[in-house]
Amino acid sequence: MTDSPSSLKTVSIVSLGCSKNLVDSELILGSLKKAGYETSSESDADLIIVNTCGFISEAKKESINTIIELLQYKRQGSCRKLIVTGCLVERYADELKRQLPEVDAFWGTGDLLKIGEIIGKNEIKKIHKSAPGTLYDPDSPRVLTTLPHTAYVKVSEGCSRTCSFCIIPKLRGIMKSRTVESIIGEVRILANLGVKEINLIAQDMTSYGRDIGTNLETLLRGLVNVDGIRWIRLLYCYPWGFTDSLVKIIREEDKILNYIDMPLQHINDRILKLMDRGTTSIRIINIINKLRNEIPELTLRTTFIAGFPSETEEEFKELLDFVEEAQFERAGAFKYSQEEGTKAGDMSHQIPDEVKEERYERLLEVQSEVSLNKNRALIGTVHEGFIEGRENGNYIARIPSQAPEVDGVTYIKRNKKLKVGDLVKVSITDADIYDLFGEVVS
């Protein structure tokens, strides 16, 4: 017997992968709330949704394991429908259908705004796929799952770059930008709800608006005028597109944090060419120098790939030397993942797993020393910070150089009653590789 739409009243969603996926999950919840659902725990929900990541092999494994784990609630009878959505479905819908017959539906990355409407009409299919990627506007129902003072805002969907290691354009489509008016309208709504920190996200932030005749500078000029917003953070900026006017607005506008997330992936010219990154080591070094020289107290975050096909020990050593010389405040690393459907996946001279692991560990070791020194240099300085919670009697805060989820936090000694969302002055008293320690000052 099939459950009627009216018999499903509660929903729980598990969001995996990046913050762009998290926004999609919040839109799914908004669609379902509009259809009459209430959120619930996984153990009590009538409907469970898993929003998957399919970017690299480790993310795929996590998604599959999560689905299998959540199927226990369907076997026990508490969950009556389980839907799997997101990038993994966009990539492997037919295979997932064969391997996981207990799942009621597989939903790609498109039409997520209609999920509540379609389920409500009982028109759900085993596989639901349309044009990949979901754009939304201020009127799209959305349930924030972040802390009340912070939110992610997706300014575009998809990517038009052709990086040889990346499957994202096939999962999300070519880049489609939201209008400036749509984004500003959403931020105004968020500000009225009490949000003070806006984290702008995209697959290619510095290319925002090129497809619709605008640019990132124009968007930022509008956003800084939204009352109530205190911090605006730029995430996923490619190492091109930093025009003089963009650098100027970052430097001059107090609301725009001096924080840039700029994934570089490598520094060796041959590897950059194989990656189809469209840049060179000299251009990368020049843009870093430009940003450092023109934006005071800049926090630079980046990511690198260890073990790209045919990478030699000498080329990897060049990357290690660069990491040590460039002194990034924040840097993460990935072991190269051979992905079907990518140009790099078909390349010869794939690096053995044990070599990738060894290079990955060496890269993190070099960056750890850099990060520790950078954090220790903050001892004695004072910064604004949002209170985010408590742990072991101490408060947890984030200062402007700490992005949510991906960076460390600042632990504050308990000396007065604070609440989540408070913006306080914090004096840094100690530091380790990832986190800072401090106390509230007047």
Image (cartoon, rainbow, N blue to C red):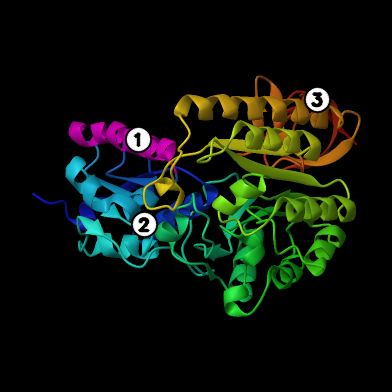
Q: Is residue 175 left or right of residue 294?
A: left
Comes first in the chain, label 1 or label 2 = 2
Amino acid type, mark 2: Leu
- Magenta residues? 56-77
Comes first in the chain, label 3 or label 1 = 1
Residue at the extreme left of the image, as rendered: 1
Residue 155 makes an appearance in the image: yes
Comes first in the chain, label 2 or label 3 = 2
State whether residue 367 is above or below residue 406: above
| Residue 259 included in the magenta stretch of the image | no
The residue indicated by pointer 2 is: 32
Look at discs 3 and 1 and give the one toward the viewer.
1
Residue 434 makes an appearance in the image: no
Marks 3 and 1, how far apart in space? 40 Å
Residue 379 in the image: state x and y as whole percent: 87, 28
State whether residue 330 is above or below residue 34: above
Amino acid type, mark 1: Thr
Task: Please tell me which residue is depicted at 32% across the width and 37% down the height of the picture.
Answer: 64
The residue indicated by pointer 1 is: 66
